[in-house]
Every structure is written in structure tokens, then in C-alpha cells.
Amino acid sequence: MPAYRAVVFDFFGTLTRSVQRGPQHAAIARSLGADPEAVTGVLDRTFRARACGRYGSAEATLRWVIEQAGGRPRPGAIRAAMPARIDALRADTQLRPEAVSALTAIRSRGVRTAVVSDCTHELPAFLPGLAVAPLLDAQIYSVELGVCKPDPEIYLAACDRLGVAPQDCLYVGDGGSHELTGAAAVGMTPVRLAAPDLANHLVFDADTNFAGRTVRSLTDVLALLDPVPALL
């Protein structure tokens, strides 16, 4: 039997490679009459609040960000910009080359999988179209739940969807949002993904003092699932 019944993954920087905002974000800001650097500043300062859904719908949140950055979008402009906003986030997101094979191998062992992401409205809009989507038994999004990591509720929601206890879960993440210490606090076994590309990753509230187990790739997670042979 595998050592764990489920593996819960972070999304950005874990199932994906390092994330940086691409040029599409600046184009959206300009189209809505705001300075791109000012918009970036608002986005950085308010990530956690936006990821918890504090400013309402996707349209309401984008309008709030643009107005905070000094923009005064004309009527209808925000709604028209929403597809571009989703496309911009999707363009920032590149799955790790081993993501599909690792998830497939995990599920072949009879182990369930989930993603738990601190995210804004865009990820639930585009993740279903990614190659990993059919390989995830549950998707937990902070913006839908109304809480962010390391709040226990977000981890326990994944356990509830998967039908497993926290003690039966391996949690894999790059360490943003203090996610690893949060996973440990509810009884999961946390593992930091320390892939080389993450040196330039856009991350908030990093778990800098985490001293637990580390892997270098998603493929390395498989070894943690296989039971250690008993000594004769």
C-alpha cells in the first residue's frame, strides 16, 4: 500500500514552472486608462485580499484595481477586458514538463490528487482547460472558499473533497503563503518543491524557515509514496 492516500499540490510554482507577469498585463492596464506600474503595485499589495475574494466578482475586482491605480475606465470597458485578463494569467502559466506524467503515476498507485491554490478568479476559469485538469480529483480555490493559506479551512476542504484525513495526505508546494507550515499544522506531511527555476518565481509570504523534506522535481514525489521494504 502507498504511504499516503492523497497528494495535495499547490498550483503556481508547483504544478507550473516559475511565474512572472508577462507584457499582456501592461497592455490591459493601458487599455483601461491606468499606468501599468501603478497597477502592478496595486496587484502586489492586494494579492491576499483579492485571492480571498474581498473585492467581489472578477469584474468588480478588476475595476477596483484599476481605480486604485488612478484609472477611470469607461462604461463596458472592464467587462470587455475580462477575456484578456484571463488570457494574461494563462500566458503566465506553463505546466512543468513532468506534471502530467507525475500525476498519472500517482493516480496509478491508487492515490488521490488535489490542487489547493491561493488564486484570483482567473485560475478557476482556465485550469479546466489544462492537461492536468482530468488528473485532479479536487480543485480548491481560495477565491471561491473565501480564505487563503495557511488557514486550516482550505486544507480541510481538500481532505473533505478527497474523503481522506489530513494525516493521510502529502502536501507539495514551493512554500508561498506559508503553505507548508499551514499544511503541517493540520496534520499533513509537507514537502517543499525546490526546483531550480523557482529562483525567479513571483511569490508572496514565502515559508522561508521551513526545514522539512525537499524535492527537486514532481517526479521525486513518487519515491515518497512507495513503502519502504521491511528488513528481514
Image (cartoon, rainbow, N blue to C red):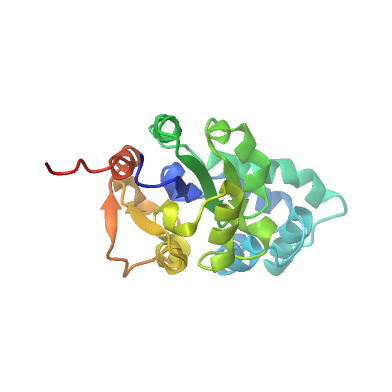
Counting from the top left corner in percent of width and height, residue 65 is at 69, 63
Q: Quadrant of residue 111?
A: top left
* Outermost left residue: 232
Pick the quarter of the image with the C terminus: top left
In the image, 70: left or right of 18?
A: right
The answer to whether one can see residue 204 in this image is: no
Q: Residue furthest front?
A: 232
The quarter of the image holding the N terminus is top left
Residue at 43% over, 49% down:
13
Toward the viewer: 215 or 56?
A: 215
Instruction: Give the answer, above or below, for where 159 lies relative to 94.
Output: below
Nearest to the observer: residue 59 or residue 15: 15
Residue 204, image x and y in percent? 47, 64
Q: Residue 128 location, x and y as percent? A: 63, 36
Q: How many marks?
A: 0
Up the image or down, 110 lies above or below 5; here it is above
Q: Residue at x 28, y 40 (%)?
A: 223
**Residue at image point 73% right, 60% down:** 61
**Left-right relation of 60 to 221:** right
Residue 174's image quarter? bottom left
Q: Is residue 209 visible?
A: yes
x and y percentages locating residue 165 in the rendered image: 50, 56
Residue drawn at (72%, 41%), measured in percent from left and top?
A: 83
